[in-house]
């Protein structure tokens, strides 16, 4: 009796923690990954973060392939990887733009300092 109760309890715990992804989960994950990749592309991440963009696109392709094979869990996992890579690429592109803007501001400040340090006639 204790064995049966224990088995039923373990089965209940396992069924609630090991819920597999389904087709709809895969579609939603792929749609999110596509949006993240498009967002990274519009942030011009392809020129600054080429490795991350390639990884995002490769993972998106793998997610679509897994969905075609009806491997929902693999599809969701690859889509999540694509989102992470696309977000990283976007962040690197923003960082690059911020660094460039900072350099421009510093150069302008240096010029102003030099102009104000010169004696006036």
Image: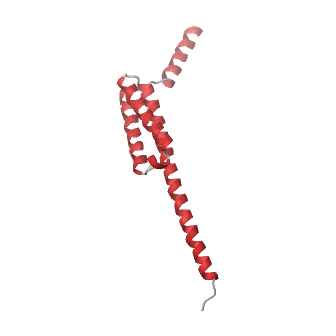
> In percent of the image, x 55 and y 71: which residue is there?
108
**What is the residue that sits farthest to the bottom in this orientation?**
121
Between 101 and 35, the one nearer to me in the picture: 101
Q: Position of residue 20 (x, y in %)?
A: 44, 24
Left or right, 75 with reference to 4: left
> In percent of the image, x 61 and y 77: which residue is there?
113
The quarter of the rendered structure image containing the C terminus is bottom right
Q: Position of residue 67 (x, y in %)?
A: 37, 26
**What is the residue that sits farthest to the top in this orientation?**
1
Q: Which picture quadrant has residue 10?
A: top right
Left or right, 113 with reference to 79: right
On screen, 8 above or below 59?
Answer: above
Residue 41 appears in the rendering: yes
On screen, 103 above or below 52?
Answer: below
The quarter of the rendered structure image containing the N terminus is top right
Q: Position of residue 37 (x, y in %)?
A: 41, 42
On screen, 36 above or below 27?
Answer: below
Residue 22 appears in the rendering: no
Q: Position of residue 68 (x, y in %)?
A: 35, 25
Between 4 and 61, the one nearer to me in the picture: 61
> In percent of the image, x 41 and y 23: which residue is there?
71
Q: Which picture quadrant has residue 36?
A: top left
């Amino acid at each position: 009796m204790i064995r049966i109760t224990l088995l039923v309890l373990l089965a209940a715990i396992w069924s609630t923690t090991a819920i597999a992804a389904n087709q709809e989960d895969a579609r939603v994950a792929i749609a999110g990954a596509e949006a993240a990749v498009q967002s990274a592309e519009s942030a011009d991440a392809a020129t600054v973060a080429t490795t991350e963009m390639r990884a995002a696109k490769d993972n998106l392709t793998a997610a679509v392939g897994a969905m075609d094979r009806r491997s929902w869990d693999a599809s969701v996992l690859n889509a999540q990887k694509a989102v992470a890579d696309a977000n990283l690429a976007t962040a690197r592109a923003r960082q690059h733009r911020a660094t460039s803007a900072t350099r421009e501001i510093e150069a302008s400040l240096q010029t102003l300092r030099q102009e104000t340090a010169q004696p006036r006639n």
